[in-house]
Image: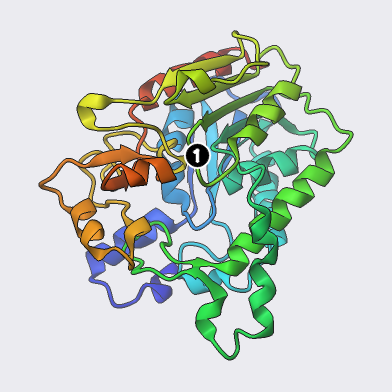
């Protein structure tokens, strides 16, 4: 399916595209105890974010494999092929994919864990609220709240047959092979509907399983305050939030110091001024999105500011990197950060969290 949608590429590149966008699975590293009732003791389902692909979960998958987990990663409907495949999809289809993944994982693992990035985090939490087999959550840049403007994103359907471009929030070059650059209005509407459904499902419920979460103070894609509110409600002794900040004056109060790890996201020597929504789950050495990777995220300049778009993509010049906040963009050419300079430290925090999980 992916290959048919991406036809026209040379064979080697097409294989690379298919490999990065396809769902995948990994078996745990040797030396970990077997399960009591199933083949494996622990299994984890990884779910990517909106307009993303399973490629974004590859490094996390390797981490969980190294730490004894049976790993499965799903591809959400409408993703991995072409942006137009998000024009008609509904969030319930994404949820069914997560449900299917959990059922397959449960055939092989005693204890089920869920890990999600952005929209994948919202789907993971939603499913955990009605499935007692889920023993814990790993949530990265969770999309628990988005702009209410997204609720009106499908208003275009009453007139878009006259003007097809009205179906889109942004239409870009889609040069990235693992993430859509164009963004349909329906995708925003479905994301908003998912967050509303999640809020309704959480009403009156307590999350009793351990939660590990990572969020950025500067995130412009999701409302980080919703993640903080969620974490403050939790009562499991193992709960942990890694919080990337650029302004120490805005570090949140209310979470006990043993439950929050505050990490300065600035690296002045690399011209990294903050973390970003897109920068959490990928390490600096990633071949595609990393410091020396093939791709530069400059679509915030396309097509209105093509001069800045070219400067942002110029590999011979070191430009500032971070989140594309209004303040950051006003200060000069800005590349949206796609990797996490603190990825190794985040893995250390996850290992400590895993060490406290039930056997």
Q: Residue furthest left?
A: 316
Place of residue 50 in the rendered image (x, y in percent of width and height, measured from the top left): 54, 54
Q: Is residue 339 above or below residue 253?
A: below
Density class for disc 1 (Cα within 10 Å; few <14, some 14-19, many ≥20) is many
Q: Is residue 26 left or right of residue 359?
A: left
Q: Is residue 94 visible?
A: no
Q: Colour scheme used in the picture?
A: rainbow
- Asked whether, in this view, residue 111 is left or right of residue 131, the answer is left
Residue 304 spot, x, y in % from top left: 33, 67
Q: Position of residue 160 (x, y in %)?
A: 60, 84
Residue located at (64% from left, 60% from top) = 150
Q: Nearer the viewer, residue 209 or 193?
A: 193
Nearer to the camera, 304 or 230: 304
Number of numbered discs on residues: 1
Quarter occupied by the C terminus: top right
Q: Quadrant of residue 11?
A: bottom left
Q: x, y percentage for residue 139?
A: 59, 34
Residue 286 visible in the shown view: yes
Quadrant for residue 192, please give it: bottom right
Residue at 61% from the left image edge and 41% from the top image edge: 121
- Mark 1 highlights which residue? 219
Answer left or right for 316 relative to 93. Answer: left
Q: Is residue 173 left or right of residue 120?
A: left
Q: Element type at marker 1?
A: loop
Q: Residue furthest right?
A: 204
Is 245 drawn above or below residue 150 in the view shown?
above
**Image vertical order of residue 9 relative to residue 343, above or below:** below
Quarter of the image where one finds residue 275: top left
Which residue corresponds to the image point at 66% horizontal and 80% vertical from the top-left? Answer: 157
């Amino acid at each position: 399916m992916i290959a048919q949608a991406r036809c026209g590429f040379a064979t080697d590149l097409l294989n690379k595209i298919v490999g990065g966008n396809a769902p995948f699975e990994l078996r745990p590293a040797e030396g970990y105890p077997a399960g009591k009732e199933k083949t494996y003791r622990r299994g984890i389902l990884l779910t990517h974010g909106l307009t993303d692909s399973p490629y974004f979960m590859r490094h996390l998958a390797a981490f969980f494999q190294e730490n004894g987990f049976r790993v499965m990663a799903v591809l959400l409907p409408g993703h991995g092929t072409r942006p137009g495949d998000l024009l008609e999809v509904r969030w319930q289809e994404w949820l069914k994919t997560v449900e299917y993944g959990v059922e397959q994982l449960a055939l092989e693992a005693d204890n089920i864990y869920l890990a999600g990035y952005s929209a994948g985090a919202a789907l993971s939490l939603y499913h955990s609220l009605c499935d007692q087999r889920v023993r814990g959550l790993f949530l990265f840049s969770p999309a628990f709240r988005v702009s209410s403007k997204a609720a009106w994103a499908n208003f275009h359907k009453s007139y878009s047959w006259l003007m097809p471009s009205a179906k889109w929030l942004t239409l870009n070059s889609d040069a990235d092979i693992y993430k859509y650059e164009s963004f349909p209005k329906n995708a925003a509407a479905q994301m908003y509907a998912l967050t509303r459904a999640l809020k309704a499902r959480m009403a009156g419920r307590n999350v009793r399983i351990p939660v590990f979460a990572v969020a950025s103070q500067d995130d412009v894609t999701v409302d980080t305050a919703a993640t903080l509110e969620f974490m403050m409600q939790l009562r499991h002794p193992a709960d942990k939030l890694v919080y990337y900040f650029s302004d120490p004056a805005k570090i949140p109060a209310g979470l006990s110091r043993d439950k929050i790890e505050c990490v300065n996201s600035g690296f002045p020597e690399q011209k990294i001024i903050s973390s970003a929504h897109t920068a959490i789950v990928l390490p600096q050495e990633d071949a595609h999105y990393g410091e020396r990777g093939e791709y530069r995220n400059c679509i915030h300049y396309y097509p209105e500011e093509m001069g800045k778009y070219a400067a942002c993509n110029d590999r011979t010049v070191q430009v500032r990197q971070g989140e594309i906040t209004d303040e950051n963009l006003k200060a000069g050419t800005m590349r949206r950060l796609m990797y996490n300079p603190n990825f190794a430290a985040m893995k250390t925090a996850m290992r400590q969290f895993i060490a406290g999980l039930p056997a």
